[in-house]
Image (tube, rainbow, N blue to C red):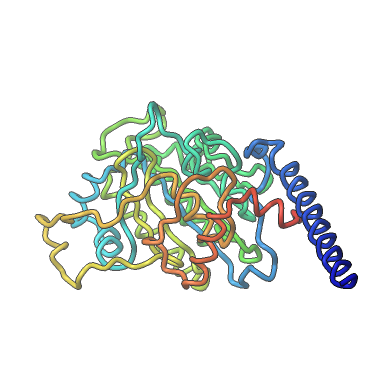
Amino acid sequence: MNRTWFHGVDHLLLWLLCAVVLCTLNFAFYEMGSSDQGYFPENSAVPKRFDDERRNDSRRIFIVFVEGLKTGHLIRHIHKSKVLARVVIHEGAWGEMSWEPPPPGFVGFEPFFTGNPEGFGPSVLSVADRVTFIGRPHIARGLKLPTNFTKLVFPAAGLTSDDDKSFDQVLIEQSVELSATRELWDLSLQKEVAILHLTAVGHANRREGLNSIRGTMALYDVFDQLDRLFNYIRQDYPYSGATFIVTSVGMQVPIIAWGHGIDKAKYPDSRNYQNPGYTVPTIPRKLNVLNMAPLLACLLDSPPPPNSIGELPESYLGLPKRSVALCQTELAMGVKICTTIRPRRS
């Protein structure tokens, strides 16, 4: 009788001790994560995974922003560009990017890289070992690039003074030169992102307001030049395993993605797209602009950025199921929980 009573008291004390320990840990985690109310400093980095969770292969993403790129323009010009015909129909994933619901006012670059409509928190680019931006320096300020690991490339004055070339042509030739000289990617790094910003429009005669530079190229000319650039990159870096993304910033803009980690289109094997009268009848995949940050994070093999409210667009991913499941788990848990459990490493 007495032994049973003492045995019950022991169990009760053990349960009370466990409850005290759990409450203490929960309070400590709350204090660690609640002081910033979910918002991290602007210069904070997206936490990286532990070394045993990271693969040995490197991750590289080449993003091209083309101003003036609209879905209607893309569909009308598919038969004029080899890269559009090949990628849209056979090699990659394409769809239309939008806002749901659409925000009031101008849509900038910040939501694209933070996954947050207000652009709060660090950019997904901060997880990269290096970010190379090719374009006008003032555009780079809106991308929330990590200052310590950013390489800004602006064409030399000798190139921009050539009146026979548009600024877009100069930028593409500069990118080709970076690839040829092996300066585009640093193969000693694990994660790299390159961004090329073009100002193409649906016609060729709009002037840019710069006296030494002629108007921008027509949209289909831009894609023909990009096709040349991407071929050079594949030749100069045959084992880089890069992901290519062409899109714009705004509403009802197309997104074209192909390469490493991207699911291929499910179109039938047909040559109808070579007919000038052919148009893509439907847009198979919709993508909220806030979903780009989780997509880029998964392609870079990293957790999504803090404050990201986007969803992981699995329809674009061609990664192994285990990798996609890990990205989904991290997105569901939230980076805030991950940072309280996992110690930050310098």
Decide which of 57, 225 is in the foreground and name it. 57
Residue 256, image x, y percentages: 34, 55
Horizontal arrangement in the rendering, residue 28 relative to residue 75 (left or right): right
Decide which of 102, 130 is in the foreground and name it. 102
Residue 243, image x, y percentages: 46, 62
Decide which of 242, 46 is in the foreground and name it. 46
The C terminus - image quarter? bottom right
Above or below: residue 296 compared with residue 99: below
The count of marks equals: 0
Horizontal arrangement in the rendering, residue 264 relative to residue 56 (left or right): left
- Residue at 57%, 44% (x, y): give it: 123
Most distant residue in the left direction: 277
Horizontal arrangement in the rendering, residue 244 relative to residue 88 (left or right): right
- Residue at 53%, 42% (x, y): give it: 154
Decide which of 155, 238 is in the foreground and name it. 238
The quadrant holding residue 79 is bottom left
Residue 230, image x, y percentages: 41, 61
Residue 238, image x, y percentages: 49, 72
- Residue at 79%, 60% (x, y): give it: 15
Above or below: residue 56 compared with residue 160: below
The N terminus - image quarter? bottom right
Horizontal arrangement in the rendering, residue 159 relative to residue 59 (left or right): left
- Residue at 27%, 60% (x, y): give it: 88
